Image (cartoon, helix red, strand yellow):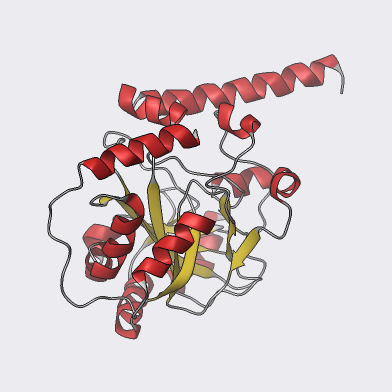
Amino acid sequence: MDMQSVALSFNSRLSRNRTAAWRYMRGGPGHFLMYVFGRFRVIRSMVAWAYTRRLSSAPVSAGASFIDDVDVDCAVRAILRDGYFSGLRLRADVLEEVRQFSLMSTCFGDEDSQLPFRLADKALAEQRYSRRLKVGRFDDVLQTCPAVLGLASDPTLMAIARGYLGTQPVLLGARMWWSFPAEANATQQMSLGQGFHFDIDGYRALAFFFYLTDVTPSSGPHICVRGSHLEKPLKALISLRKGRSDAEITTWYGTERQVALCGSAGSGFAEDIFCYHKGSHPESGERLILQLRYGLQRYDRNLPEPYRT
């Protein structure tokens, strides 16, 4: 590599780091400090321990669960050990309600509010916008879909989150989106969460994902790197860059720890999103997924919510 290429690469990394740092500084000093120091295991553990010392006395959620029976203690142990637990399933009636919502509601193509469409009109929308749509994101699903709002306080999910976080879970957000098998380069895939990355929503955070369509190896399964919430190279911790190439992940962790989570519609999993993970780019078929995120506290109330998978 010549000196000009080295300089361009350095300037590109510097620009990305400045952008990331500025975004977290906008959230206030606490948010920025969390982003910088929340990468290190000893600090994450200390802060999480401090929250357990002031465990909220709020009552545990009661009532019927939207989730089929699951062993909460087993789920918590699996997340602590592996970073994920894949034994969740939505009740059939809840799955149907959310799916009907997705068919009747408008979503937005490729992160652009100027590209609205409904799934039934996707082909016409692609003609109108002169582009193949890669994703379709729904806005404000907590406010517009009663089933998602109910799921956000589901007693089973709250019990798992409370067991893992060690304190009363704080809802950080909810997202639902389609992923389509349209051509996308590596940069575009990374921007849509389809490249390996980890998320720092706090010193400890947990996300629940539910497939609302059948997901096979070719239709964009979520991939989690087992145990990577506990183990990251120093290079990854001191860089502000959270995204990594497939080659880097394979070098660090091998292929055997990259777990592709396939499943039928209604299946779900919990994940510590400090794990390296990605939604693989669909080769065929289309994937609809719902995500609910919880943490110790909400840091970024004044910031636009980023798109992640």
Establish if 99 lies above or below 298. below
Q: Tell me where residue 82 appears, x and y as whole percent.
A: 53, 58
Is 250 left or right of 234, judged from the image as shown?
right
User: Which quadrant of the figure contains the N terminus?
Assistant: top right
- Residue 142 is drawn in which quadrant? bottom left
- Residue 16 is drawn in which quadrant? top right
Is 283 left or right of 173, judged from the image as shown?
right
Q: Residue at x 32, y 35 (%)?
A: 303
Q: Nearer the viewer, residue 194 or 111?
A: 194
Q: Is residue 181 visible?
A: no
Q: Residue furthest right?
A: 2
Q: Residue at x 49, y 69 (%)?
A: 86
Q: Tell me where residue 251 appears, x and y as whole percent.
A: 75, 45
Q: Is residue 125 visible?
A: yes
Establish if 193 lies above or below 212. above
Q: Residue at x 30, y 78 (%)?
A: 94
Q: Tell me where residue 275 appears, x and y as whole percent.
A: 53, 49
Q: Residue at x 25, y 75 (%)?
A: 65
- Residue 33 is drawn in which quadrant? top left
Q: Across the whole image, how many numbered discs are drawn on residues?
A: 0
